[in-house]
Each structure stands twice: as C-alpha cells, then as structure tokens.
Image: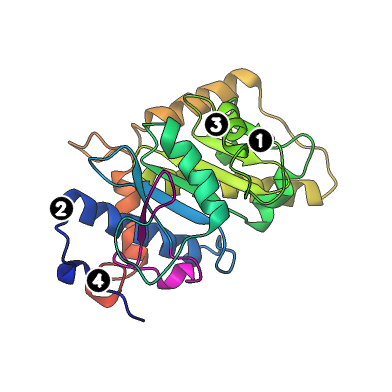
Amino acid sequence: MNVQSLSSRKAPMSDAEAQVRRDLAAAYRLVASYGMDDSIYTHISARVPGTEDQFLINPFGMLFRDITASSLVKIDLEGRIIEPSPYDVNPAGFTIHSAIHSTRHDAVCVAHTHTLAGVAVSSLEEGLQPCNQWALQFHNRVVYHEFEGIALDHSERERLIADLGPTSRAMILRNHGLLTVGRTVAEAFLLMLNLNRACEVQIAIQSTGKKIHMVPDAVCELTAQQYEGGDSNRLPGSADPDAREWAAMLRRLGPPDATTYLD
C-alpha cells in the first residue's frame, strides 16, 4: 500500500490536523471493531482544523479496519482532492458530508453507518422509540430524512441540510441508516455507538412480540438532559464530557505502538 506517513509528508501539517487525523482513523477502526461497518461503504468525515471548506474522509475501497491517519483523503466542498493521494472518495459520501460541512459549522465530525439494526429502525414507520435508556438520549432530538435513492444527486444536499436543521446531532436516514454530527470526533462516534445500541435493543424488544413498556415523557426528557449535561462522565478538571469514554475506546484498539492508526 503506497501511503506516505504523516512524518514524511512534504506539505506542512499542524499538530491540530495530525490529532484530528489520528482520532478519525481511530473512529474508523472502532466502527469496524464494533461491527458497525459495511464492507467498503459508509463514511466518517472530519473538518480540517483552521478551515471551513476542507474535510478528511476515508479512501474509497479500503476497509475501515485498515484506515490510518495518513491514508485519509483531504477534499474540499467542491470534491477536489487537496493533497496528492492514490485514492479517490465515495461519491455518495461526498454528497452527504459536503452538505453538512458546508452548512453546519459546528460539525467537526460526521458519521454515517448502515448497521442492520439502524437500517431496520430506519425502515419502521414509527422510527426510534423511547423504549430503552440509550434511546432516551435522543428523545425529541433525532430527525428524519426521506430516502431518495443512493445519494449521488447533489440536489439532495439541500433537503438533507433542511431536515438536519441547525442543531440536531442525530439523524435517521429512512430505509437507509444512521447519521450523527459531533463537535469532536469522539462525540460523533459515541453518539453513533449509542444510537445503534438503541436500535439494537428496540429490534430485540419488538422481536419478542410483547407489549413495550414505555417511559413517561417527563422521564424521557430528564434522561435526555442528563445525557446532554454529561456531568456523570466528566473527568475531574476536564471540560470534555467525552474524554473519559474516548480514552477507554482508544485503549480498546490496543497500545498505540501496536496499532497502525497512529502511523
């Protein structure tokens, strides 16, 4: 595989970009580790620090388990590859991610998956139900976008952006899959992990054929707010509610010197 390492790139790279690349590569490998990948399809992107019109995305054709910090492709909102790369990008991935990065300036990272449970719930008329604790994180906070076919038509971007709105961090793409928006790579990944778990539990409950015990609306809202506060997860002295869990996720990948996502 002819991929330059970060240290051997000719173009200068900021420490901030190097860190985002490492986090994004880790997110790809974690998605694979949790079985949320779909062959070479789906995608996670991250805005290049210090820019408004450039983002990093996976090389099309590479398995998520193999993605490294240096193999990520840097493109702009017009789809132009910014730095030399032996890879191109998934056209559907460009449509979805360029739409969100162009409008949601808080969207540092955007994750999209086709998990079995996520696609199943996206295909149910009632969508995600407030029937388990993971689902309550998204109570009245998940939005929906109708299926329009494989996302190759750039005109769909306007409707995707309109459905996502200015603040939503979770979207269910009807008959298609799941999408999350994070202010960090960690946030986008952890939201996706929990959204998929919520879908898995819902499908498991519905498969019993028994009546679902629903949670009162007031408790649903309280739980969603507790998730948003993140105080129970916060490391002492840290302003980042995801820092504790993200550090644990990185350890799941093994010691840094035993993995290649930090190449």
Considering only order in the chain, which callout, 4 or 1, is on the residue closer to the N terminus?
1
Q: Which mark is residue 15?
A: 2
Whole-angstrom CA distance, mark 4 to mark 3, is: 34 Å
Q: Amino acid at mark 2?
A: Asp
- Tell me the magenta residue range: 59-80
Q: CA distance from mark 2 to mark 4?
A: 14 Å
Who's the residue at 43% across and 65% down the image?
Answer: 59
Q: Mark 4 or 3, which is nearer the eye?
A: 3
Q: Is residue 149 above or below residue 160?
A: below
Q: Which mark is residue 145?
A: 1
- Is 199 situated left or right of 100 in this image? right
- Residue 141 shows up from this direction: no
Kindly identify which numbered label has been placed on residue 161.
3
Q: Is mark 3 in CB contact (under 8 Å) with mark 1?
A: no
> Residue 209: x, y in percent?
85, 47
Marks 3 and 1, Cα distance to the nearest angstrom? 9 Å
